[in-house]
Image: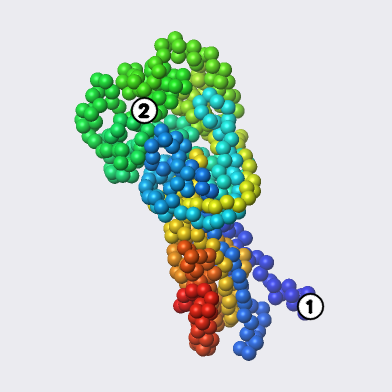
C-alpha cells in the first residue's frame, strides 16, 4: 500500500481519543467515540475485536486512619481509627463539595476493602496549633483515592492521591481551620443536632452528661431555650447559643482573656466568663498581657501574619492558616500598623500574584508498600474527614470493585476508539451499581455506539465475601443469533466447571 493510501485510510483517526476530555468520576457514556472501518470483509472472514480492560478500583485508606465521627472527643480527640469502625453505623463530619461548608451525614458499610493493596503516603504541612511552627502530618491510601483540593478562592476539585502535586492545598477539617470558616458557621454539636434531630432553629443541643466534648449521639438532646436554661441555671452557667464552649476554651488557653474574647464575638465579658469560667485556670488581665507579650511564638506568629498579608495573602487565608478568627488577624495587622486595603483590592492583588496556598499544603506523595485498606459509604455527600482532610468514600455498594472487563465484538461499520473506551470505563469508578447492571450498561452503550454484528461483555470481578461474580452480557444481530445462543451455553457450562457466572 502506498504512503498516500495509508494517509488516506488513517485520515481523521489521529484526531480521535477525546483530546479535550478529562478524567471523570461519574458515569458518562458521551465520552465514547468510534471511527469508521477502512477495509471490507465478507461474513466468512469477519474479524473479532478483543479488549481487556483493568477497571473498577475501590479507593481506600489504611486501618489506622483517623475518621472524624460523632464520638466522645475527650477519649478520641483526633478521630477513631477506621478499622475500629468496621461493622458500625453512625454520623461522620463531612463537607458539601459545592459550598465547602461542614455538614454531618450518616455513614455505613465500613469494611476492609482489600488485603495487601499497594498504597502511597501523602505528606502535608500545616500549623499545629496557635503560635506553633508548622508540622507535618500524613495519610496513607491507595494511589487512586480522591482528595478534595482547593481550587481558586471558593472552588474545589477531586484529585487522585498519585496526582497530588507539591503546594496543592487540601480542604481541612473543623479542628484545623479558623473560626472564619467552618467553626463560626455552626458548632460541632449543632451540626450533629441537625443531622440527628432535623431542623433545630430556635432550639439548643444539650449534652446530657454535661461533658461538652462528649458528642456521642446518645449524649445529645434537643431542648428549647427555656428548658436548657433551666437545666444549667443561667446565673451560674450563662447562655448564648452562638458561642461554642470548645472554641472559647481554646482561645482563652492560647493567651486571650475574657475581655478580648468578648470583643471577638460581640458580647459582654460576663457572658464569656459564665460560659467558661469554671472550665479554665483563670488569670488576671496582667497575667494575660504578660503571656501574650512575652511568648516568643506569639511574637513570631504576629510577625508572620504581617509578612503574609504584605506578601499578598488574604485575611481569610491567613486566619485559616493560623487558626485565628479573621477579626483577630485584622487586629494584629492594625496593632503592627500594617495598612489594610479593601477586600476587592486584596482579592485582585491575590489573583495577580498567583501565590501558593497556605494551610494543609501537599509536601510529597511517596510509595508506602502494601497494607490492608478500608473504606465506608457516606450518604449524600460521599466524602468525609480523615486525618484532618476531606477524602472520597467508596461506591454505594460498599464493596471492593476490582475487575478485568473483557469486551469482544464483530464490527459492522464502526470500531470503538481505545482512549475513549478507557475514559468511559474510568467514569464507572464512582458509579454505584451492581456488577451485573454495570456489565449490561457497558454492553448497551457499546451497541448503541457501534451497531455491531455481535458484541459480548463480561467482567471478572474480585470475590465479595468469598463469592465470585462474573456477569456476562451479549448482543447479536439477526444473522448472529445462533452464535449468541452457543456463546451463552458455553459460558454457563464454564461457570459450572469453574466460577459462578450470570448470563443475560
Q: Which residue is mark 2?
A: 245
Q: Is residue 436 left or right of residue 194?
A: right
Specify which label sits upstream in the sequence, 1 or 2: 1
Q: Which residue is mark 1?
A: 2
Check the picture and name the quadrant holding the N terminus: bottom right
Of the two numbered discs 1 and 2 in the rendering, the one whose residue sits closer to the viewer: 2
Residue 16 location in percent, x, y?
A: 63, 66
Residue 87 location in percent, x, y?
A: 41, 52
66 w.r.t. 225: above or below:
below
Residue at point 53% right, 49% down? 61
Q: Is residue 131 left or right of residue 47?
A: left
399 w.r.t. 4: above or below:
above
Question: Within 10 angstroms of label 2, few (less than 14), some, or many (20 or more) residues?
Answer: some
Question: Residue lying furthest top in this view?
Answer: 286
Dot 2: element: helix
Residue at point 44% right, 31% down? 180
Res. 241 image quadrant:
top left
Question: Within 10 angstroms of label 1, few (less than 14), some, or many (20 or more) residues?
Answer: few
Dot 1: element: loop
Amino acid at each position: 500500500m502506498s504512503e498516500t493510501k495509508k494517509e488516506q485510510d488513517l485520515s481523521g483517526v489521529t484526531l480521535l481519543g477525546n483530546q479535550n476530555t478529562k478524567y471523570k468520576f461519574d458515569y458518562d457514556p458521551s465520552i465514547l467515540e468510534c471511527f469508521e472501518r477502512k477495509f471490507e470483509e465478507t461474513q466468512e472472514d469477519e474479524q473479532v475485536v478483543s479488549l481487556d480492560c483493568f477497571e473498577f478500583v475501590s479507593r481506600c485508606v489504611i486501618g489506622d486512619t483517623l475518621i472524624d465521627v460523632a464520638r466522645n472527643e475527650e477519649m478520641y480527640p483526633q478521630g477513631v481509627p477506621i478499622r475500629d469502625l468496621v461493622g458500625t453505623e453512625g454520623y461522620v463530619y463531612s463537607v458539601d463539595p459545592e459550598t465547602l461548608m461542614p455538614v454531618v451525614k450518616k455513614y455505613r458499610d465500613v469494611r476492609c476493602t482489600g488485603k495487601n493493596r499497594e498504597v502511597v503516603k501523602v505528606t502535608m504541612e500545616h500549623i499545629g496549633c496557635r503560635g506553633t511552627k508548622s508540622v507535618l502530618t500524613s495519610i496513607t491510601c491507595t494511589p487512586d483515592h480522591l482528595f478534595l483540593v482547593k481550587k481558586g478562592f471558593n472552588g474545589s476539585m477531586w484529585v487522585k492521591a498519585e496526582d497530588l502535586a507539591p503546594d496543592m492545598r487540601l480542604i481541612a477539617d473543623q479542628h484545623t481551620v479558623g473560626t472564619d470558616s467552618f467553626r463560626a458557621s455552626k458548632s460541632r454539636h449543632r451540626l450533629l443536632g441537625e443531622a440527628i434531630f432535623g431542623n433545630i432553629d430556635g432550639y439548643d443541643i444539650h449534652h446530657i452528661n454535661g461533658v461538652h466534648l462528649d458528642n456521642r449521639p446518645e449524649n445529645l438532646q434537643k431542648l428549647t431555650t427555656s428548658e436548657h436554661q433551666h437545666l444549667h441555671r443561667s446565673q451560674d452557667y450563662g447562655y448564648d447559643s452562638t458561642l461554642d464552649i470548645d472554641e472559647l476554651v481554646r482561645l482563652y488557653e492560647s493567651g486571650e482573656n475574657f475581655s478580648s474574647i468578648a470583643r471577638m464575638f460581640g458580647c459582654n465579658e460576663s457572658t464569656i466568663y459564665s460560659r467558661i469560667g469554671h472550665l479554665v485556670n483563670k488569670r488576671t488581665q496582667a497575667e494575660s498581657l504578660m503571656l501574650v507579650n512575652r511568648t516568643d511564638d506569639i511574637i513570631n506568629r504576629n510577625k508572620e501574619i504581617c509578612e503574609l498579608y504584605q506578601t499578598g495573602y488574604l485575611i481569610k487565608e491567613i486566619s485559616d492558616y493560623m487558626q485565628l478568627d479573621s477579626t483577630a488577624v485584622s487586629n494584629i495587622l492594625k496593632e503592627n500598623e500594617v495598612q489594610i486595603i479593601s477586600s476587592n483590592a486584596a482579592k485582585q492583588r491575590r489573583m495577580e500574584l498567583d501565590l501558593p496556598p497556605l494551610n494543609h499544603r501537599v509536601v510529597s506523595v511517596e510509595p508506602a508498600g502494601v497494607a490492608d485498606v478500608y473504606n465506608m459509604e457516606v450518604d449524600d455527600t460521599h466524602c468525609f474527614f480523615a486525618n484532618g482532610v476531606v477524602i472520597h468514600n467508596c461506591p454505594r455498594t460498599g464493596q471492593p470493585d476490582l475487575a478485568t472487563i473483557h469486551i469482544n465484538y464483530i464490527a459492522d461499520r464502526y470500531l470503538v476508539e481505545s482512549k475513549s473506551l478507557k475514559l468511559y470505563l474510568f467514569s464507572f469508578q464512582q458509579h454505584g451499581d451492581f456488577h451485573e447492571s454495570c456489565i449490561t450498561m457497558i454492553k448497551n452503550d457499546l451497541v448503541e455506539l457501534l451497531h455491531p454484528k455481535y458484541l459480548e461483555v463480561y467482567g471478572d470481578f474480585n470475590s465479595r465475601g468469598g463469592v465470585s461474580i462474573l456477569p456476562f452480557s451479549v448482543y447479536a444481530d439477526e444473522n448472529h443469533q445462533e452464535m449468541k445462543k452457543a456463546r451463552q451455553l458455553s459460558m454457563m457450562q464454564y461457570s459450572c466447571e469453574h466460577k459462578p457466572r450470570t448470563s443475560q
